[in-house]
Amino acid sequence: MNLRKLIFTNNACYKAGKTITPKGIMVHSTGANNPNLKRYVGPDDGVLGYNQNNNHWNQNTPDGQQVCVHGFIGKLASGSIATYQTLPWNYRGWHCGKGAKGSGNDTHISFEICEDGLVDAAYFNAVYKEAVELCAYLCKEYSFDPLSDGVIIGHYEGYKRGIASNHSDPSNWFQKQGKNMDDFRSEVKKSLLAGEPSKILYRVQIGAFSIKENADAALAKVKAAGFTDAFIKTE
């Protein structure tokens, strides 16, 4: 993961300064054919590239809207892929909509994947991998289980749960590339497991007990210590 930071200090969402206790992650995609991070992230930090329209989201109400997410994934000026953190992870974002339909703002960290024309498999695979790694990073940071219900969801799943507005992202893109959110969650889990150090457990055989209750108590102590293959022989 190529994680960079450019906090949207000029956005009204950041200025509101409200914080949350994150319960999960909501995945969005932008819905526009523009894979360049500079469209949304600015001003240019030397690698983003110059946005001549000055319509990035680091302003009070970008495009006249009250919108803000915690991060973006897309292309740098060089064409390489990067992730930009644009809000502190524990800030309340404006990514789900307003009112009751926007209650996911109170619970979920959010990021947008910059869409292209939805047919470039190489670009999709690159940003998909980056998104998996970002989610694995956040899951580790907040002790999230990516396979637990509601922890990692797409915007469209947020809508189905009644916590987000009616959008189809990122399913509209994922399906075109033979992926879905179940695939995504599974790959986040694999990424997490791949990053965990291996553990060595030793099989332990302990002495004989004439009273079964004592044998059971000894087994419980061994298991509590982290041994999963302990044997007690009772005669």
Image (cartoon, rainbow, N blue to C red):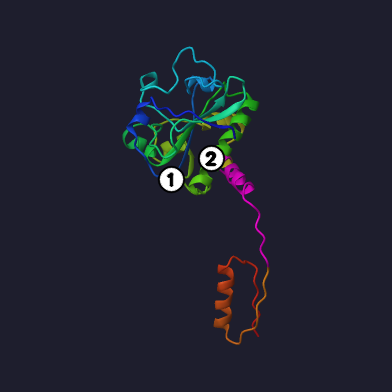
Which residue bears the numbered disc 1?
23
Magenta span contains residue 72: no
Identify which residue, 202 or 101, lies in the foreground: 202
Classify the position of the C terminus by image quarter: bottom right
Look at 38% across and 36% down and name the residue there. Answer: 92
Q: What amino acid does circle 1 point to?
A: Lys
Above or below, comparing residue 186 to residue 33 in the picture: below
Drawn side of residue 234 relative to residue 46, left or right? right
Give how far across and how far down residue 210 sits, in percent: 61, 87
Q: Residue at x 39, y 45 (%)?
A: 21
Residue furthest to the front: 46
In front here: 85 or 191?
A: 85
- Find the magenta span and give its range: 184-202
- Which one is nearer the viewer's eye here, 158 or 209? 209
In-image side of 25 versus 11 (left or right): right
Q: Position of residue 165 (x, y in %)?
A: 39, 32
Question: Which numbered marker is on residue 135?
Answer: 2
Q: Is 101 on the left-hand or right-hand side of 37? A: left
In which quadrant will I find the N terminus? top right
User: If you read the primary sequence from the N terminus, does the residue marked by circle 1 or circle 2 appear first?
Assistant: 1
Please, what secondary structure does the residue beneath circle 1 have?
loop
Circle on res. 143: none
User: Does the magenta run of residues contain 194?
Assistant: yes
Q: CA distance from mark 1 to mark 2?
A: 13 Å
